[in-house]
Image: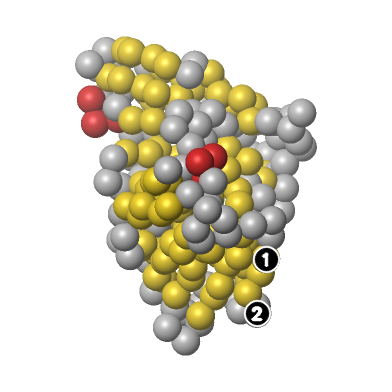
Amino acid sequence: GESVGLHLPTLSVQEGDNSIINCAYSNSASDYFIWYKQESGKGPQFIIDIRSNMDKRQGQRVTVLLNKTVKHLSLQIAATQPGDSAVYFCAELQDDKIIFGKGTRLHILP
Amino acid sequence: EAQVTQNPRYLITVTGKKLTVTCSQNMNHEYMSWYRQDPGLGLRQIYYSMNVEVTDKGDVPEGYKVSRKEKRNFPLILESPSPNQTSLYFCASSLSEDREETIFGEGSRLTVL
């Protein structure tokens, strides 16, 4: 079975607030993690990645946090906008394969 | 523009009628892969290819074949489609073996009756 999963299938956030999407993984040997965004009718789009030698990585309005002790990964989106509405997948590189979690749907409330 | 192009985008076919979904990338990427996406199951890898003439099974390869005769193309072949292969299929490619910034195609929605 998959080693990567998400805590919540759906997350609703007020526009302008920060969003936090969580992910747990089970393979402690994994050293590369990726977050993807999938908008309706489109393919997944790379957002940000992080290697296991880092705890935090920041992009434009997004931050990924990695806690190797508890095997937890999170994606933080600052000042959530309507365009952030999508399904977000965490993924893990395992034996040359990208293993995806099942996804969290982010709803933006006006 | 860097892109991964899949064809067809939509297809309805019948059980047993062979079909091919083509995938082409214009970025000279070495690594390409195929996924299927099903409700509640997320994205599952079917096959991947590290380079020309090198292909490997992913998590759900049964009922599928692939080929990588040239770097830019990675077709997915369903020799005898069955209804359980009704799904949304994505092709993806990336430059490095670490899969940094993998680029996905727009998807091909296949229905097998």
Residue A34 in sight from this viewpoint: no
In this view, B10 is above or below B24: above
In this view, A23 is above or below B89: below
Question: Going by the image, does B79 lie left or right of A49?
Answer: left
For the rendered model, the colour scheme is secondary structure
Residue A108 picture location, percent across and down: 42, 46
Name the residue type under label 1: Gln
Comparing labels 2 and 1, the label whose residue is closer to the camera: 1
- Residue sitting at 61 percent across and 79 percent down? A55
- The numbered dot on residue A58 is 1
Subunit bearing disc 2: A
Q: In the rendered image, which quarter is residue B108 located in?
A: top left
- Residue sitting at 29 percent across and 27 percent down? B86
Name the residue type under label 2: Asn
Residue A49 picture location, percent across and down: 62, 61
Crowding around mark 1 (Cα neighbors within 10 Å: few <14, some 14 to 19, many 20+) is some
- Residue sitting at 64 percent across and 30 percent down? B4
Residue B104 picture location, percent across and down: 58, 38
- The numbered dot on residue A53 is 2
Task: Specify the quadrant that holds the N terminus of chain B.
Answer: top right
Question: Going by the image, does B27 lie left or right of A6?
Answer: right
Crowding around mark 2 (Cα neighbors within 10 Å: few <14, some 14 to 19, many 20+) is few
